[in-house]
Amino acid sequence: MTSSVLAVLTVSPWPAQSGIARRLDAIVDACHRSTQLTVAVVVPDGRDVAPPSSVRTTRVRRSPSRAASVTEILRGLPDGRPITMGFYRRGGARARLRTILEETQPDVVFTHGLGGAGLCDGLFPARRTVLDADTIDPSTYRRIGRELGGFRGLQWTLDADRIARWMRRELPAYGSVTVVSRHDRELLDAIAPAARLEVVPNGVHLGQARREDPGGGTFLFVGGRTYPPNRNGLSWLVRSVLADIPTGFCELRVVGEGATPIAEGVVAVGVVPEMAAEWRQATALLVPIRSGGGTRLKVIEAMAYGVPVISTAIGVEGLDVQAGQHYLLAERASEWRLAIDRISADPSLRAQLAEAGRSFVERHHDWTVCTQPLVRSLHRVASGGVDTDTL
């Protein structure tokens, strides 16, 4: 018998522009093909949601009121809830979600991140819930806190401690908790060893062919700058690396929402409907990230297209890739300038990295394969913890 699933999402998979949205889009697609799926997208008033007509979807409005957030944050402090949950646990959204649960009577709920966990808490049994925890990692919050510094950094650091305590207490109650890599599984296992953890890697749809090498010096940065690790990494790259590269030697195209540093050779592209054209013209993807966590879909997508990658170690964290074989490692500004110079000048190096990256993605990051553990977990949780042969 096919399991009925209610997916409660606080990030809309449509349009699939951010890394989280593309992960959720692939998960929804896999669930749609394998379960009786209903999607509840909980987004602020005014936020567009344009789901495929084939997916049964309802939009739940979430008030953007700061006062409502503060109220929920204060209400959650004695209960030990992470501060982040307060931005999602608003009465109207929870009341509407309660009605949807009564109407759909799902066998299992799938939800994502601290926002989804906070919304569903108390409305549906945790033992019948699959929580995608790819953005729930106290070490990520601590890294961001150290990088930001000041009062904002202190907020991230304090919430890291609350998240760790919440995970230790609550994760073992979930029917299944999914993470994006073995690295993340080890981190969460150290915090909540009784949790039922399942690795569901990020992936790509491999229908596209490897692009032809465009040569030249057109580099690409991808990421929303509302996320501190992206904003700070880009600012550092422009200030500490590109400022010392001769004018006209290269162009940096910046894709994603948010402010872009104004500098010679930096082009603010903004949000694009799809990335294929940007991948085709990029000499390499630059990932100057020095905090954050998870595995970055932009790295996997670049490799799928045959785009070489220059990255910090944190930028490729969670991926089983080797520096010098699958990507070029750069940490200090001098290493970044050298790597950019090597990539620009050496077609054979670009070809070697493109081939190794594409082969790596084909072996390990095809969405069709990556989403199978999640669907199995949904069926297992729906059946009361008994493995099924549904797939």
Image (tube, rainbow, N blue to C red):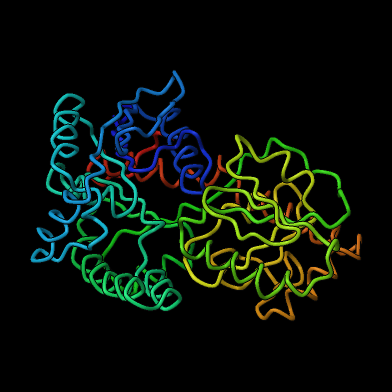
Residue sitting at x 46%, y 52% = 200
Where 119 sits versus 35, above or below? below
Q: In this view of the protein, which residue sits in the foreground, 111 or 389? A: 111
Q: Is residue 381 left or right of residue 236?
A: left
What residue is rendered at 31% in x and 76% in y?
A: 154
Q: Position of residue 241 (x, y in %)?
A: 71, 73
Q: Position of residue 56 (x, y in %)?
A: 35, 22
Looking at the image, residue 99 lies above or below residue 122: above
Image coords of residue 245 (percent x, y): 80, 71
- The residue nearer to you, when weighing 215 against 211, is 215
Q: Quadrant of the N terminus?
A: top left
136 vs 50, left or right, is: left
- Where 72 sits versus 349, above or below? above
Residue 232, above or below 149? above
State which quarter of the image contains the C terminus.
top left
| Numbered disc total | 0
Residue 155 shown left or right of residue 143 in the figure: left
Q: Is residue 335 left or right of residue 58?
A: right
Q: Tell me residue 135's x, y (percent).
A: 39, 58
Quarter location, residue 82: bottom left
Q: Report the residue at 36% width, 45% height from top.
A: 377
Q: Residue at x 64, y 59 (%)?
A: 262
**The one of 171 and 113 positioned closer to us in this rendering:** 113
Q: Residue furthest top?
A: 53
Q: Which residue is at the front of the view, 257 or 164?
A: 257
